[in-house]
Image (cartoon, rainbow, N blue to C red):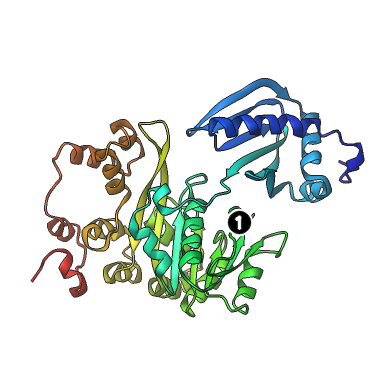
């Protein structure tokens, strides 16, 4: 395959077709456009994949589209077989793009990047999430599957710091999605592949660049995790993401990245620096939109002890027990709140719940027992610092 692209010979007809579909997706409020060789274009609208038009993109057309989109980066695409980039549609609309080879040719996914950074109120995030922006040091993780709104939540946190504090913020992203303008803070945003070779290289360099806050787009490997833990341990506030489904799996995933003989050290480090974990699931709402259901782990003496003692299986119960005092919540508690407030239907609540049977019992008023009793029954150690949760005197 010829890796060189003569831009002067390109007509950009295929890119124009894609732009027409991007325009249509913007108009209907979709989130992702899927372009695939030997298939019609499809878009994700309100969480569902729907066809956009009936014209099939041939293998040759899809390859031409890749050349028109990438131009001078086409050779890099052929070599790496996939690329991430940001595509500016116009002044008001930008897209994060992943383009890749698959068995039928080239495919690409365009994801909408909102130009305006939404506020916590617009995202309907609980106040406890906003409180993580006020931390001076430690590690805050936002987790969830692809498309669950992790980047948006992180952008809201960084924007809150930018509006309220005088700090130096460094972001390391692949690619840069939300663009932050300096307000009260200095913000340096670095794109992996364009401004730096890797997350690890940029994170190591960031520690010599006088940062107060570091955002690492994703903790992908052992070295990046090690550096992020070190940065948090040395007095920085570090934000990052993982593709994990909940707080317990997040802690397990971080520790499992390391050899057995290192895992105890990592547990001690993680227990010492972890400020919180925000896990997200986007759920269709009754009014046709989507709302993020959250699991929120907040650092407490009990949580720290459970991590240290390798009792991760008790973390969800500890999160639920701390809802009133620490404002933590499990997914099921968050989903039940959305249902009780008339935001999501019973069917959606049961579909997205961690334990559908437990939620259904709570909906029917059959599981409203004493939280402290539940905690003891589940064998959660209640430290002296946590006694006031349960009014133990």
Residue 358 at x, y = what percent?
23, 42
- The quadrant of the image that shows the N terminus is top right
Residue 95 at x, y = what percent?
63, 44
Q: In terms of depth relative to the viewer, which is nearer, 367 or 119? A: 119
Q: In terms of depth relative to the viewer, which is nearer, 333 or 353? A: 333
Q: In terms of depth relative to the viewer, which is nearer, 337 or 167? A: 167
Query: At 8% across and 71% down in the image, what residue appears?
Result: 393
Residue 171 vertical placement versus 74 (above, below): below
Q: Residues within 10 Å of mark 1 (few under 14, many from 20)?
A: some
Residue 231 at x, y = what percent?
52, 75
Query: At 58% across and 54% down in the image, what residue appears?
Result: 178
Helix or strand or loop: what does disc 1 sit on? Answer: loop
Residue lying farthest to the top in this orientation: 54
Judge left or right: residue 109 versus residue 352.
Answer: right
Residue 58 at x, y = what percent?
76, 26
Q: Could one spot residue 243 in this view of the protein?
A: no
Query: At 56% across and 46% down in the image, what residue appears?
Result: 114
Q: How many marks?
A: 1
Q: Could one spot residue 240 in this view of the protein?
A: yes
Q: Which residue is mark 1?
A: 179
Judge left or right: residue 113 versus residue 387.
Answer: right
Q: Quadrant of residue 367?
A: top left
Q: Quadrant of residue 182?
A: bottom right
Residue 387 vertical placement versus 336 (above, below): below
Judge left or right: residue 223 versus residue 272.
Answer: right
């Amino acid at each position: 395959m010829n890796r060189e692209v003569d831009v002067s010979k390109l007509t950009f007809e295929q890119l124009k077709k894609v732009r027409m579909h991007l325009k249509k997706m913007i108009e209907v409020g979709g989130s992702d456009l899927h372009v695939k060789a030997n298939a019609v274009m499809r878009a994700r609208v309100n969480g569902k994949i729907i066809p956009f038009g009936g014209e099939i993109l041939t293998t040759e057309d899809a390859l031409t589209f890749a050349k028109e989109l990438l131009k001078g980066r086409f050779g890099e695409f052929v070599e790496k077989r996939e690329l991430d980039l940001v595509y500016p549609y116009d002044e008001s609309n930008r897209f994060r793009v992943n383009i890749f080879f698959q068995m039928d040719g080239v495919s690409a996914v365009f994801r909408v990047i909102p130009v305006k950074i939404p506020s916590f109120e617009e995202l309907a995030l609980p106040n406890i999430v906003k409180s993580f922006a006020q931390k001076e040091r430690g590690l805050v993780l936002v987790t969830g599957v692809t498309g669950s709104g992790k980047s948006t939540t992180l952008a809201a946190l960084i924007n809150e710091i930018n509006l309220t504090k005088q700090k130096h913020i460094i972001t390391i992203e692949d690619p840069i999605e939300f663009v932050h303008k300096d307000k009260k803070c200095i913000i340096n945003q670095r794109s992996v592949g364009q401004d730096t070779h890797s997350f690890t290289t940029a994170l190591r360099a960031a520690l010599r660049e006088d940062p107060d806050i570091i955002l690492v787009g994703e903790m992908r490997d052992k070295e990046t995790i090690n550096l992020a833990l070190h940065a948090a341990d040395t007095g920085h506030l570090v934000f990052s993401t993982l593709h994990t489904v909940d707080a317990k799996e997040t802690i397990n995933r971080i520790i499992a990245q390391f050899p057995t003989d290192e895992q105890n050290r990592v547990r001690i480090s993680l227990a010492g620096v972890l400020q919180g974990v925000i896990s997200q699931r986007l759920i269709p709402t009754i009014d046709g939109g989507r709302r993020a259901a959250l699991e929120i782990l907040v650092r407490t003496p009990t949580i720290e002890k459970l991590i240290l003692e390798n009792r991760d299986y008790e973390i969800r119960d500890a999160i639920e027990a701390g809802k009133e005092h620490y404002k933590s919540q499990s997914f099921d508690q968050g989903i039940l709140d959305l249902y009780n407030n008339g935001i999501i239907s019973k069917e959606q609540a049961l579909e997205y719940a961690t334990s559908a049977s437990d939620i259904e019992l709570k909906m029917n008023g059959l599981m409203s027992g004493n939280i402290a009793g539940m905690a003891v029954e589940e064998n959660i150690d209640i430290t002296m610092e946590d006694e006031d949760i349960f009014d133990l005197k």
